[in-house]
Image (tube, rainbow, N blue to C red):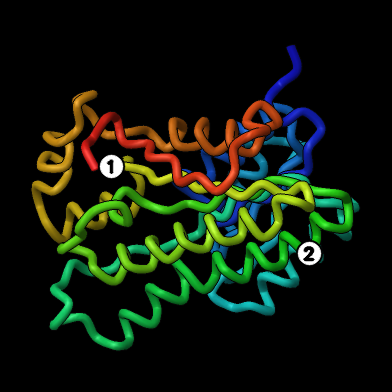
Protein backbone atom coordinates (compact mmCIF):
# COMPACT_ATOMS: atom_id res chain seq x y z
CA UNK A 1 0.00 0.00 0.00
CA UNK A 2 1.31 3.45 -0.90
CA UNK A 3 1.90 6.03 1.81
CA UNK A 4 -0.73 8.72 2.42
CA UNK A 5 1.08 11.55 0.68
CA UNK A 6 3.30 9.62 -1.70
CA UNK A 7 4.95 11.95 -4.21
CA UNK A 8 3.12 15.09 -3.13
CA UNK A 9 4.65 18.53 -2.72
CA UNK A 10 3.35 19.79 0.62
CA UNK A 11 3.57 23.16 2.36
CA UNK A 12 3.27 23.48 6.14
CA UNK A 13 3.00 26.88 7.80
CA UNK A 14 3.73 27.38 11.47
CA UNK A 15 6.13 24.47 11.11
CA UNK A 16 8.84 25.42 13.59
CA UNK A 17 7.12 23.77 16.59
CA UNK A 18 4.00 22.06 17.88
CA UNK A 19 1.42 20.75 15.44
CA UNK A 20 3.21 22.22 12.44
CA UNK A 21 6.53 20.57 13.21
CA UNK A 22 4.80 17.25 13.89
CA UNK A 23 2.93 17.58 10.60
CA UNK A 24 6.06 18.32 8.60
CA UNK A 25 7.74 15.21 10.01
CA UNK A 26 4.69 13.02 9.43
CA UNK A 27 4.05 14.28 5.90
CA UNK A 28 7.62 13.41 4.96
CA UNK A 29 7.23 9.95 6.52
CA UNK A 30 4.08 9.57 4.45
CA UNK A 31 6.01 10.24 1.24
CA UNK A 32 5.71 13.99 0.69
CA UNK A 33 8.39 16.49 -0.17
CA UNK A 34 7.79 19.18 2.44
CA UNK A 35 8.40 22.92 2.54
CA UNK A 36 8.27 24.29 6.06
CA UNK A 37 7.48 27.90 6.89
CA UNK A 38 7.66 30.01 10.02
CA UNK A 39 9.29 33.08 11.52
CA UNK A 40 11.90 31.36 13.70
CA UNK A 41 14.71 30.40 11.34
CA UNK A 42 16.76 28.54 13.93
CA UNK A 43 13.80 26.34 14.88
CA UNK A 44 12.90 25.79 11.21
CA UNK A 45 16.46 24.69 10.50
CA UNK A 46 16.33 22.19 13.35
CA UNK A 47 13.04 20.63 12.21
CA UNK A 48 14.12 20.58 8.56
CA UNK A 49 17.43 18.93 9.50
CA UNK A 50 15.57 16.28 11.52
CA UNK A 51 13.52 15.38 8.44
CA UNK A 52 16.36 15.25 5.96
CA UNK A 53 16.58 15.70 2.21
CA UNK A 54 12.80 15.61 1.71
CA UNK A 55 12.44 18.97 3.46
CA UNK A 56 13.40 22.60 2.97
CA UNK A 57 12.22 25.78 4.63
CA UNK A 58 11.25 29.39 3.93
CA UNK A 59 11.26 32.07 6.60
CA UNK A 60 7.99 33.97 6.27
CA UNK A 61 5.62 35.99 8.43
CA UNK A 62 2.11 34.82 7.57
CA UNK A 63 0.69 38.07 8.92
CA UNK A 64 2.23 39.78 5.87
CA UNK A 65 0.48 39.11 2.55
CA UNK A 66 3.66 39.74 0.49
CA UNK A 67 5.39 37.07 2.58
CA UNK A 68 2.56 34.63 1.85
CA UNK A 69 2.84 35.25 -1.87
CA UNK A 70 6.63 34.93 -1.75
CA UNK A 71 6.32 31.67 0.16
CA UNK A 72 4.01 30.03 -2.38
CA UNK A 73 6.09 31.38 -5.27
CA UNK A 74 9.19 29.82 -3.69
CA UNK A 75 7.48 26.43 -3.44
CA UNK A 76 6.65 26.64 -7.15
CA UNK A 77 10.17 27.75 -8.00
CA UNK A 78 11.72 24.85 -6.09
CA UNK A 79 9.30 22.08 -7.04
CA UNK A 80 7.17 23.23 -9.99
CA UNK A 81 3.83 22.68 -8.28
CA UNK A 82 1.97 22.64 -4.98
CA UNK A 83 -0.19 19.60 -4.20
CA UNK A 84 -1.04 19.98 -0.52
CA UNK A 85 -1.02 22.86 1.98
CA UNK A 86 -1.52 22.81 5.74
CA UNK A 87 -2.26 26.33 6.96
CA UNK A 88 -1.35 25.87 10.58
CA UNK A 89 0.34 29.14 11.59
CA UNK A 90 -1.50 30.89 14.39
CA UNK A 91 -1.25 32.59 17.74
CA UNK A 92 -3.15 32.75 21.01
CA UNK A 93 -4.21 35.75 23.03
CA UNK A 94 -4.03 36.68 26.70
CA UNK A 95 -7.26 35.51 28.38
CA UNK A 96 -9.60 38.49 28.56
CA UNK A 97 -13.27 39.44 28.47
CA UNK A 98 -14.60 41.18 25.37
CA UNK A 99 -14.80 44.49 27.23
CA UNK A 100 -11.15 44.20 28.26
CA UNK A 101 -9.68 43.20 24.88
CA UNK A 102 -7.57 45.97 23.39
CA UNK A 103 -7.79 46.91 19.75
CA UNK A 104 -4.10 46.04 19.38
CA UNK A 105 -4.64 42.49 20.63
CA UNK A 106 -7.80 42.06 18.52
CA UNK A 107 -6.07 43.22 15.35
CA UNK A 108 -3.01 41.01 15.92
CA UNK A 109 -5.05 37.90 16.73
CA UNK A 110 -7.37 38.42 13.76
CA UNK A 111 -4.53 39.19 11.38
CA UNK A 112 -2.58 36.04 12.22
CA UNK A 113 -5.46 33.60 12.77
CA UNK A 114 -7.85 34.68 10.03
CA UNK A 115 -6.42 37.15 7.52
CA UNK A 116 -3.27 35.05 7.09
CA UNK A 117 -5.30 31.92 6.40
CA UNK A 118 -7.56 33.77 3.96
CA UNK A 119 -4.68 35.00 1.83
CA UNK A 120 -2.77 31.73 2.16
CA UNK A 121 -5.77 29.88 0.73
CA UNK A 122 -5.97 32.46 -2.08
CA UNK A 123 -2.31 32.04 -3.04
CA UNK A 124 -2.44 28.25 -2.75
CA UNK A 125 -5.56 28.01 -4.91
CA UNK A 126 -3.87 30.02 -7.65
CA UNK A 127 -0.86 27.70 -7.50
CA UNK A 128 -2.95 24.52 -7.49
CA UNK A 129 -5.06 25.60 -10.45
CA UNK A 130 -1.95 25.57 -12.59
CA UNK A 131 -1.38 21.86 -11.95
CA UNK A 132 -5.00 20.70 -12.04
CA UNK A 133 -5.94 20.60 -8.36
CA UNK A 134 -4.78 19.96 -4.84
CA UNK A 135 -5.81 19.85 -1.21
CA UNK A 136 -5.77 22.43 1.58
CA UNK A 137 -6.28 21.96 5.31
CA UNK A 138 -6.68 24.90 7.68
CA UNK A 139 -6.17 24.75 11.44
CA UNK A 140 -9.24 25.92 13.32
CA UNK A 141 -10.00 25.15 16.98
CA UNK A 142 -12.57 23.55 19.24
CA UNK A 143 -12.92 27.11 20.53
CA UNK A 144 -14.57 28.05 17.22
CA UNK A 145 -17.35 25.50 17.66
CA UNK A 146 -18.71 26.59 21.03
CA UNK A 147 -18.73 29.59 23.34
CA UNK A 148 -15.17 30.70 24.09
CA UNK A 149 -15.43 33.19 26.96
CA UNK A 150 -11.76 32.97 27.88
CA UNK A 151 -10.47 33.72 24.36
CA UNK A 152 -13.23 35.59 22.49
CA UNK A 153 -11.06 37.20 19.80
CA UNK A 154 -9.25 33.93 19.11
CA UNK A 155 -12.52 31.98 18.96
CA UNK A 156 -14.05 34.53 16.61
CA UNK A 157 -11.07 34.42 14.26
CA UNK A 158 -11.11 30.64 14.16
CA UNK A 159 -14.85 30.62 13.47
CA UNK A 160 -14.14 32.88 10.52
CA UNK A 161 -11.66 30.24 9.31
CA UNK A 162 -14.50 27.70 9.39
CA UNK A 163 -16.66 29.92 7.20
CA UNK A 164 -13.79 30.55 4.80
CA UNK A 165 -13.11 26.80 4.58
CA UNK A 166 -16.72 26.01 3.68
CA UNK A 167 -17.05 28.85 1.18
CA UNK A 168 -13.76 28.22 -0.61
CA UNK A 169 -14.47 24.48 -0.75
CA UNK A 170 -17.62 25.18 -2.73
CA UNK A 171 -15.97 27.78 -4.95
CA UNK A 172 -13.09 25.55 -6.04
CA UNK A 173 -14.52 22.03 -5.96
CA UNK A 174 -15.08 22.01 -9.71
CA UNK A 175 -11.39 22.78 -10.22
CA UNK A 176 -10.28 19.72 -8.28
CA UNK A 177 -9.27 21.59 -5.14
CA UNK A 178 -10.52 20.23 -1.83
CA UNK A 179 -10.45 22.46 1.25
CA UNK A 180 -11.08 21.26 4.80
CA UNK A 181 -10.11 22.18 8.36
CA UNK A 182 -9.27 20.45 11.60
CA UNK A 183 -10.57 21.79 14.91
CA UNK A 184 -8.13 20.61 17.58
CA UNK A 185 -9.21 20.17 21.15
CA UNK A 186 -6.76 20.53 24.02
CA UNK A 187 -3.34 19.75 22.55
CA UNK A 188 -0.01 20.01 24.33
CA UNK A 189 1.65 22.82 22.40
CA UNK A 190 3.53 25.95 23.42
CA UNK A 191 0.29 27.92 23.13
CA UNK A 192 -1.37 25.72 25.75
CA UNK A 193 1.68 25.84 28.00
CA UNK A 194 1.62 29.65 27.83
CA UNK A 195 -2.10 29.61 28.68
CA UNK A 196 -1.37 27.37 31.66
CA UNK A 197 1.17 29.92 32.92
CA UNK A 198 -1.40 32.70 32.57
CA UNK A 199 -4.23 30.61 34.06
CA UNK A 200 -2.82 27.85 36.29
CA UNK A 201 -4.99 24.74 36.25
CA UNK A 202 -6.41 25.26 32.76
CA UNK A 203 -4.88 22.01 31.46
CA UNK A 204 -6.37 20.00 34.31
CA UNK A 205 -9.72 21.72 33.82
CA UNK A 206 -9.68 21.11 30.07
CA UNK A 207 -8.67 17.48 30.46
CA UNK A 208 -11.64 16.85 32.73
CA UNK A 209 -13.96 17.58 29.81
CA UNK A 210 -12.30 15.05 27.46
CA UNK A 211 -13.82 11.53 27.48
CA UNK A 212 -10.49 10.01 26.41
CA UNK A 213 -9.08 11.46 29.62
CA UNK A 214 -6.00 13.23 28.32
CA UNK A 215 -4.85 16.09 26.09
CA UNK A 216 -3.84 15.32 22.53
CA UNK A 217 -0.30 15.09 21.25
CA UNK A 218 0.62 17.34 18.29
CA UNK A 219 1.26 14.18 16.26
CA UNK A 220 -2.41 13.20 16.58
CA UNK A 221 -3.49 16.47 14.98
CA UNK A 222 -0.94 15.92 12.24
CA UNK A 223 -2.46 12.51 11.49
CA UNK A 224 -5.91 14.06 10.97
CA UNK A 225 -4.48 16.73 8.68
CA UNK A 226 -2.51 14.14 6.69
CA UNK A 227 -5.63 12.09 6.01
CA UNK A 228 -7.59 15.14 4.86
CA UNK A 229 -4.74 16.14 2.55
CA UNK A 230 -4.46 12.64 1.10
CA UNK A 231 -6.33 11.02 -1.76
CA UNK A 232 -7.95 8.67 0.76
CA UNK A 233 -10.30 11.51 1.73
CA UNK A 234 -11.12 12.17 -1.92
CA UNK A 235 -14.86 12.78 -1.36
CA UNK A 236 -14.41 15.04 1.66
CA UNK A 237 -14.46 18.81 1.22
CA UNK A 238 -15.83 21.77 3.15
CA UNK A 239 -15.56 19.88 6.46
CA UNK A 240 -14.37 21.21 9.81
CA UNK A 241 -13.26 18.01 11.55
CA UNK A 242 -13.32 18.13 15.36
CA UNK A 243 -10.30 16.32 16.78
CA UNK A 244 -11.26 16.59 20.42
CA UNK A 245 -11.01 13.22 22.14
CA UNK A 246 -14.80 13.05 22.26
CA UNK A 247 -15.34 16.40 23.97
CA UNK A 248 -18.91 17.53 23.50
CA UNK A 249 -19.48 20.52 21.25
Residue at the image position 63 percent from the left and 78 percent from the top: 65
Q: Would you identify the image quadrant in which residue 28 lies? A: top right
Q: Nearer the viewer, residue 130 or 16?
A: 130
Name the element at disc 2: helix
Q: Quadrant of the N terminus?
A: top right
Residue at the image position 37 percent from the left and 43 percent from the top: 184
Q: Is residue 128 left or right of residue 135?
A: right
Q: Which residue is mark 1?
A: 186
Whichever of callouts 2 and 1 sits on the residue coming sooner in the sequence is: 2
Q: Residue 99, relative to residue 2: is it above or below?
A: below
* View extreme (bottom): residue: 103
- Residue 228 horizontal/vertical position (percent): 59, 36
* View extreme (top): residue: 1
Residue at the image position 32 percent from the left and 41 percent from the top: 187
Q: Nearer the viewer, residue 112 or 59?
A: 112
Question: How far is disc 2 from disc 1 in space, using C-alphas?
Answer: 33 Å
Nearer the observer: mark 2 or 1; the answer is 2
Q: What is the count of numbered marks?
A: 2
Q: Is residue 103 left or right of residue 139?
A: left
Q: Which residue is mark 2?
A: 126
Q: Are marks 2 and 1 in contact (CB under 8 Å)?
A: no
Q: Would you identify the image quadrant in which residue 67 lies? A: bottom right
Q: Residue 49, relative to residue 233: is it above or below?
A: below
Amino acid sequence: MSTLLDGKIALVTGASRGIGAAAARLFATEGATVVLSGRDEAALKDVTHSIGSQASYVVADMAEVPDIERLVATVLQRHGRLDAAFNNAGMGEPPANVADTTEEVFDRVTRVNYKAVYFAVAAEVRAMRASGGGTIVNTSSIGSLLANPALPAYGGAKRAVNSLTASAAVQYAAEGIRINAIAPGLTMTQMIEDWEKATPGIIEHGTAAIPLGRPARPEEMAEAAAWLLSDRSSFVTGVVLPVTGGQSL
